[in-house]
Image (tube, rainbow, N blue to C red):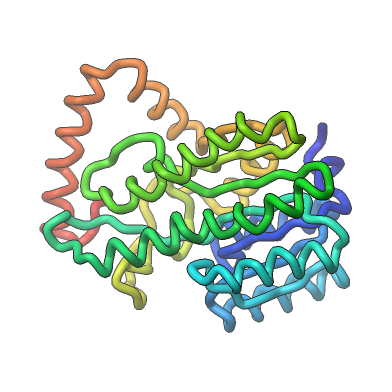
Amino acid sequence: MQVAEHFCDKGCVITGAASGIGLAVGEALLAAGAAVFMADVDAAALETAAHRLAAAHPGRVQAMPVDVTKADDVRRMVEGAAARHGRLDVLFNNAGIGATQPIETVTLDHWRRIVDINLWGVVHGIHFALPIMRRQGGGHIVNTASMAGLMPFPFQALYCATKFAVAGLSESLRFELADEGIHVSVVCPGHVASAIFGKPLAGGLVDLPLPPDAIPADEAAATILAGVAARAGIIALPEGSRTLWRRYWSDPEKSETWMLDLARQRREAIRTKGTYY
């Protein structure tokens, strides 16, 4: 099925929709004819993005400031979108933050922040979407994890912990809910050009260059929507990252050596440049 045909007239909710992958997915959904409900904790950025998209797609864009760590915010988002459109066809649990730092610099507050956003944000979305999708007889939940949810990259222990959890949660639910007509996909991107690289775990903003192999967000969005339309379980991207993932699991001995070398490279990069790439 073509992407436009699959998403036309569908009611779609996206968290983390004000920038990066979330915004690009929203733009692609609107181009396919969907109604898009945009949510983000950054109210100012959300208003700017939604205003721009609504001008090009009148009547099909709604925006709501949402903190995914707050269950009631997510409940209002999901129930409000379903009520306005008449159904909740696709929920993109996309909001998240990154973390790459030596484990000795990590505090318990860091752990709580990343678990609250990356894991609880997804749990909240699933919890409130499932009853609606069951009542209407189907739907699709799309959770954003990462290649760091498929491979244990060094110096990303916190990020891997949350993204492995999202990947496992998604795959488990995919099989559990299949016979109810509720589909579950997990998106596992490698480097995608987005603001996540300039937002440290402790909060605030830093001025860091993008990784040299980062792909444009619109390219990522196209791959994601094609995977969702095909009802793929794991949507790994881009192709180079998919190849790396396959090699990691197919040759454990080489992968062990590669990860140890990568840990040494990242330790030196963090020491000298303040970033792992």
Q: Residue 38: x percent and y percent?
A: 68, 67
Name the quadrant of the N terminus: top right
Of the pair 50 and 183, the residue shown nearer to us: 183
**What residue sits 47% from the left and 30% below the top?**
242
Give the left or right position of residue 108, taking residue 119 as reference: left
In this rendering, the answer to whether 4 lies above or below 65 is above
Of the pair 7 and 112, the residue shown nearer to us: 112
In this rendering, the answer to whether 64 lies above or below 241 is below
Of the pair 211 and 199, the residue shown nearer to us: 199
Q: Residue 102: x percent and y percent?
A: 16, 55
Q: Residue 114: x percent and y percent?
A: 36, 61
Q: Quadrant of residue 15?
A: bottom right
Give the left or right position of residue 127, taking residue 27 as reference: left
Q: Residue 216: x percent and y percent?
A: 54, 52
Give the left or right position of residue 146, taking residue 94 as reference: left
In this rendering, the answer to whether 235 lies above or below 216 is above
**What residue sits 84% from the left and 68% below the top?**
84
**What residue sits 78% from the left and 58% below the top?**
30
